[in-house]
């Protein structure tokens, strides 16, 4: 796999994981890896993403596999969407009146804001 493509896949994997608040350890366990370093190599672009892992991750993140391997990452978490337009990011957040849902969305928005500030999104 070409280095540039591996780099894009690695970036997409990291962004999807971070935006959803998962640790590398959790993802490695979800994928059935013995330890997190096996998954970490995907995010570092040091290992090729296996198709079966891409399918499982796409299911977890509720996106198409193409979303994980696309050169232009975007994030879709259920009803949450974002689009880059003129340097702006739009996000739709569902609230149900519960404080738990509100806190979860606030944390997600803070993470997105941090990525924007670092110009990683």
Image (cartoon, rainbow, N blue to C red):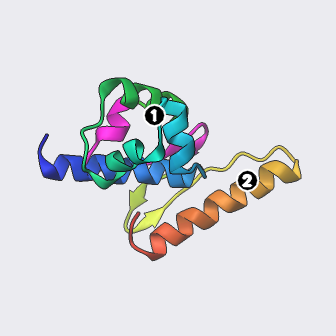
Q: Residue at x 16, y 52 (%)?
A: 4
Indicate left or right for 118 with 11 as reference. Answer: right
Q: Which residue is mark 1?
A: 33
Does residue 73 appear in this view? no
Residue found at the far left of this picture: 2
Mark 1 vs 2, N-terminal side: 1
Image quadrant containing the N terminus: top left
Q: Residue at x 67, y 50 (%)?
A: 93
Q: Residues within 10 Å of mark 2 (few under 14, many from 20)?
A: few
Q: Is residue 89 above or below residue 70?
A: below
Query: Where residue 72 sits: x, y (%)?
Result: 30, 50
Residue found at the far front of this picture: 34
Residue found at the far right of this picture: 98
Query: Where residue 22 sits: x, y (%)?
Result: 58, 48
Query: Where residue 38 sits: x, y (%)?
Result: 38, 42
Q: Residue at x 24, y 49 (%)?
A: 46
Region of the chain picked out in magenta, as a range? 65-81
The front one of 63 and 47 is 47
Assess whether residue 80 is covered by the magenta stretch: yes
The front one of 73 and 35 is 35
Q: Which residue is mark 2?
A: 104
Q: Is residue 114 above or below residue 104?
A: below
Indicate left or right for 39 with 82 as reference. Answer: left
SS assignment at label 1? loop
How far apart are labels 1 and 2 at the CA level?
Answer: 27 Å
Quadrant of the image occupied by residue 65: top left
Indicate left or right for 100 with 83 as reference. Answer: right
């Amino acid at each position: 796999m070409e280095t540039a493509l591996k780099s894009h896949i690695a970036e997409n994997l990291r962004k999807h994981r971070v935006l959803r608040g998962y640790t590398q350890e959790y993802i490695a366990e979800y994928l059935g890896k013995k330890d997190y370093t096996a998954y970490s190599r995907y995010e570092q672009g040091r290992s090729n993403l296996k198709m079966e892992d891409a399918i499982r991750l796409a299911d977890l993140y509720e996106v198409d596999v193409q979303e994980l391997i696309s050169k232009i990452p975007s994030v879709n978490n259920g009803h949450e969407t974002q689009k880059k337009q003129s340097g702006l990011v739009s996000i739709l957040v569902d609230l149900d009146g519960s404080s738990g849902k509100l806190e979860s969305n606030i944390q997600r928005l803070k993470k997105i804001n941090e990525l924007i500030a670092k110009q990683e999104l």
